[in-house]
Structure formats: C-alpha cells, structure tokens
Image: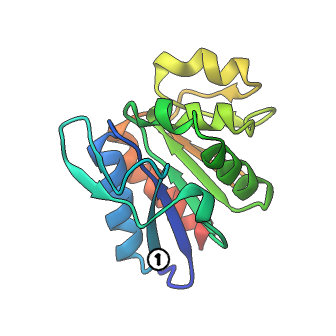
Amino acid sequence: MKITSKKVAVLVEDLYQELEVWYPILRLKEAGAKVIVVGTGTKKVYLSKLGYEVKADTEARKVKDIDGIIIPGGYAPDRLRRYEAVNKLVHDTFRKNKVVAAICHGAWVLVSAKVLKGRRATCFNAIKDDVINAGGKYVDKEVVVDGNLITSRKPEDLPAFMKAVIKVLN
C-alpha cells in the first residue's frame, strides 16, 4: 500500500528500543510516507538502549499538520511523557482523529496524554495496569486497532503493527 500523501511523526528520546524506532521509519518510507523524527528538544541526537544514534528532525512543540504519530518503546516513553509538548502533540493528534500508534512501553505516553479512556489497547505486559488505570480496556493481542488508536505489545509484533498503521493511514 502506498501512503505518499501522508506525513508521520516518530517520537524519540534516549533509551529508545532500536527496532521499534527504525522498523517503523523504514516501513513508512518504503510505503511512501514523509517521516519526521521528533524529539523532546533536549538535544539533536538521541541514543538507543544499545547506543545507536537517531537524529531528530524537529521537536514536539514545533510539529504541525501530521497524519499520524508512532510512539516506540524501550525506556524512552518514560522520558517522553515528562514533556508537556509531547503529551499535547499526542493528545491533539488523537483528538483530530489522526493515527496514534504505540508499541510496547509507548503506551506510557498514551496514559500521560490522556487518550485511553474507554479505548481498547495493548502494551508490554509490565505496564498493563497503567493502561487499565488510565481507563483503557486491555487486550492481550499482537495488534489492537480501536479507530485511530493502534497498539502492540513488543518488537516481535512489529510486522502486524506496521501493517495496521499503514492500512489505517491509507
């Protein structure tokens, strides 16, 4: 499927999970989307859990007019959720009925952005209680699509996750 007219943000911060950043970036580009790597604004280059670099194109407070947002896991979401600009970007994107997709610990940002109430979602099992306490309806599946909200559990779910993201973006 081609999504050449779509602009998608991928959030990054230090300690991101490598596959959960790079696989979506590459799959989205392959599908023709314009991908922007979005950081918190604390620096230009962020390091993964294993020390791999990713350069941010911009920071969350400067992002406008996107069709979707990807929230990768690792420990980065625990840092991302501390920035009001990140939570506002996710919340506003969600409220505009644009695609909001989170994998693994990325659901922590969904909790802080207050977008889970009454929505079906999955996540890494260690943060299942956080999703439930935020009003989400936890489902243990490789990918859960609830309207414009797409969630997955772990890196092994990336093929199903990105297939769903591209389908909903299309």
Residue toward you, 53 or 121 = 53
Residue type at tag 1: Ala
Q: Position of residue 48 (x, y in %)?
A: 27, 41
Residue sitting at 70 percent across and 62 percent down? 98
Occupied quadrant, residue 47? top left
Q: Is residue 64 left or right of residue 95?
A: left
Q: Position of residue 20 (x, y in %)?
A: 36, 46
Residue sitting at 35 percent across and 51 percent down? 21
Q: Is residue 57 left or right of residue 50?
A: right
**Number of numbered discs:** 1
Q: Position of residue 42 (x, y in %)?
A: 44, 47
Occupied quadrant, residue 60? bottom right
Which residue is under mark 1? 33
Q: Is residue 21 left or right of residue 133?
A: left
In the figure, 76 relative to 134: above or below?
Answer: below
In the figure, 35 relative to 76: above or below?
Answer: below
Which residue is at the far bottom?
5
Say what secondary structure mark 1 lies in. loop
Residue toward you, 107 or 118 = 107
Residue sitting at 46 percent across and 77 percent down? 34
